[in-house]
Each structure stands twice: as C-alpha cells, then as structure tokens.
Image (tube, rainbow, N blue to C red):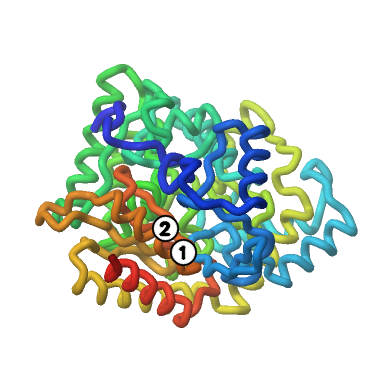
Amino acid sequence: MSASRSPQAPSLLALNTYAGGAAALDATESRLVERRRATFGDAVPLFYAQPLNIVRAEGVWLFDHEGRRYLDAYNNVPSVGHCHPRVVQAIAQQAARLNTHTRYLSAVVSDYAERLLATFAPPLSRVLFTSSGTESVDLALRMARYHTGGSGFVVTRFAYHGHSMAAAEITPAFGPGVALGAHVRCVAPPDTLREGPGAGARFARDIAAAIADLQRHGIGFAALILDSILSSDGVFADPAGFLGPAVAAARNGGGLYIADEVQPGFGRTGAGMWGFARHGVAPDIVVMGKPMGNGMPIAAAVTSPDILASLSSRTGYFNTFGGNTVSCAAAAAVLDVLADEDLIANAAGVGAHLRHGLAGLQARFAAIGEVRGAGLFVAADIVENDGAWTPDTAMALRIVDGLRARGILISTCGAAGNVLKIRPPLPFSRENADQLVEAVEAVLAGP
C-alpha cells in the first residue's frame, strides 16, 4: 500500500506497441506512419509490432486496406458488434432530424435516461451524461469530494481511470512519468494465482490500511474507485463476492464506493448489466462509457439523489456534447440489441466456452499460469516455467503478435504486461472462440 509506483511497472500505453523500424510495412502503411508522426508526434502509440491499417468493420470482423479480415477479440467499444445496422440506422435517422444538447427538453434523451436508470436498484436513480469515461470519472470524483468533504482516493496499483488531470492523478497505469496525487493511495489487486485463496481478505485489509494512511496524513477519505473486473491490473474476477469486504472497508472509513463500469459494464461479464452485481455490492456512484453507444461519444455517471444534491447545491452541470440526441439514439439502440439478441446470455455461454478451451491449453502448456475472467472478459496469465509464476512479458507479446499474424486481434494488460486481454464484441460465437483457442495453441506449439 503506497502512493508510489513499482519501478518495474510500465505505462499502460507502452504495452503491445509499435516501436518503429522493425516491421515490414508496405508503401501505404509506411506513408500513413509518417503522416501520423508528422501530426501526432510520439504522443499516440500504435498497436502491434506491425501496425494495422483498418478500413472497415462488420460484426466481430475488422478488414485492412488489402481486404484481409481479422477476428476482433479485443475491442469492447463496439459492444454489440462493429457497425451494427440497428445502431447505424438510429444514428442516421436522429442526425437527419436533430442533434443538440441537454439544455432543451427532449423525449429522446429522457426516454434513454429512464431506460438506463431502470437497470439499477434504488437509490441509484439520477444520471448525468458525459462524452467519455474520463469525463464520467472526473465528475464522480467531484461528487465524492463534495459529498464526503474528503479528498483522498484509493485505487488498485495498475488502475486506469482516464486522461483528465484529476483522473490521471488516480491512474497509476500511466507509469512513473505521470505522478499520482498526494491524495491517492494504491493497493495491489487480489492475485489468487500468486497469493492463494486469502487474496481477497488481504485486498480488503490493504484498503483499510490505505484509508488509515490517508487520515494519518491529514487527508480525509472520499472514495474507493474500482474497475469491477480490475481490467488494467490483469483481469481479476473471482471468487465472485471478493469486492464485498473491500467495499465494507471503504464505507467503514467514511468514504464512498465508485464502481468504474467503463470496461465491464453493459453485459460484458455475462451476469447482468453491471460487473459489480456479481459481487453483491451496491455502489454509491457508477461511471460508464466506451460500450454505451457502440462507438458514439456517450458516457454517464449514475448516483443517488442525495449525492447528486451535493453537486447541484453548489453548481449546475452542463456538457455540450454529453447526452446529445444522436448519441442517446445510438445508446438506446444498443439497449435494444442487447435485449433482442440476448447478448448478455451469449457473453456468459461463449465466455465459459472460451475459458474452458484456454484451460485445456493451460493443462498442456506451462506458459499459461492461469485462465480467469467472467463472461466475454477473459485473461490468460503468461508465466515463465520456473515454478514461481514469474510474469513472462516477452512470451505474452509473442502470442499477441503470433495471433495478429494469424488474423486474430487481442492485447495485453497487467503491471508486467504479461496478461493476455481478451474482450471481443458481444456477438462473439463459439466458433469464433474455437478459432482463437486453436490459434493460441498454434503459437504456443510453434518454434
């Protein structure tokens, strides 16, 4: 438990990136790389040792400039599938009719707000729309500070919560180049592979100790903020319920629990709409983003009337693009597709099938230390064959690039960058899962 970062921890943005020079780029790709450098500089990294030039997408497939298709087992933003026709139609129809902000009355916006809030239990009955998960997190931090009077936050050691100044100060995943705030404390995630079944209890104790350390330094505790599946830390899902003691520790310390559902939300874990529900806990604030509009810029913070009043009694809230009518139409179509195509049940069934297939490989290949996850959020912890579960970052990247060469896209996560991160669009099928498992097997068995 510390506000400092592990010196071994890379930046999240340094994982699975194009380093330049080594890849055999064609003329089109080389020109695009140079144009990108001339406009973005070095601020925006590309994926993979050989970057991809993606020009179109459909369902669970991406297509490059030469027409080669790639099975997308990574992108959670198009949650109901790339370019889903019902979402595209909703966007086009609303854009042709009206696109404006929330300072006007709009049935489109109110209808969506009511449908979204119906997925939560009381007292979570108020919503503020934003344009991104970062904005939602930033807003949640403000509400927590106003409501509790504290300014201290506890996060996991490689958490990612956003890019604004306030969000970056609670994002250790940015690495040593971006300082954590003095009001922030980090705790290690509950890693059952390396700690055993006591990991969850240790996690709760560390949270309590972090809160005590904030208070010892004269910093009032505002909130514990957790990605409900600890995505960036390496995807830690089980046992379901381990978040209960952690949340209790936060409440005992006088703070709130903010559930970051930007990645696990909207059915991805296969156990209902929200990742926190698997643990039987009730958040004080829920933030969401990426999958909400299937790629359209819409996100939100949901909370109770009394916590919202802590904000509204001081100031109003307005976001020019947050909750615009086109994005709300897209988000409403996402809810329709989730229900009509039974995608949450699909996430549960296909996710279990995928984990079973990877577990079969784990039994044969020592490189896979553990397979974990929930629904269609799956991870494989890649380790050295030393009996100590030492992270093997090089092997993880070899698998990622080997899959890319075979037309399948995933990435990595975790503080050592050694955990395979698999989170495909929710229409992912058993056949897609089998293709992924067979490709992983081929990479592991190859030279």
Q: Dot 2: few (<14), some (14–19), or many (≥20) neighbours within 10 Å? A: many
Give the residue at mark 1: 405
Q: Quadrant of the C terminus?
A: bottom left
Give, as a three-letter code, the residue at label 2: Asp
Give the residue at mark 2: 401
| Residue 224: quarter of image | top left
| Residue under the point 43% across and 49% down | 283
Residue found farthest to the right: 97
Residue 191 position, x and y percent, is 22, 52
Residue 61 position, x and y percent, is 59, 70
Q: Residue 206 versus residue 20: which sits nearer the camera? A: 20
Q: In the shown orientation, is residue 291 left or right of residue 220?
A: right
Residue 417 position, x and y percent, is 34, 47
CB within 8 Å, label 2 to label 1: yes
Q: In the shown orientation, is residue 304 left or right of residue 299?
A: left
Q: Is residue 307 something that shows in the picture?
A: no
In this rendering, the answer to whether 184 lies above or below 244 is above
The mark found on residue 323 in the picture is none
Q: Is residue 203 something that shows in the picture?
A: yes
| Residue under the point 47% across and 77% down | 432
Q: CA distance from mark 2 to mark 1?
A: 6 Å
Give, as a three-letter code, the residue at label 1: Ala
Q: Residue 74 versus residue 44: which sits nearer the camera? A: 44
Q: Quadrant of the N terminus?
A: top left
| Residue 96: quarter of image | bottom right
In this rendering, the answer to whether 151 lies above or below 92 is above
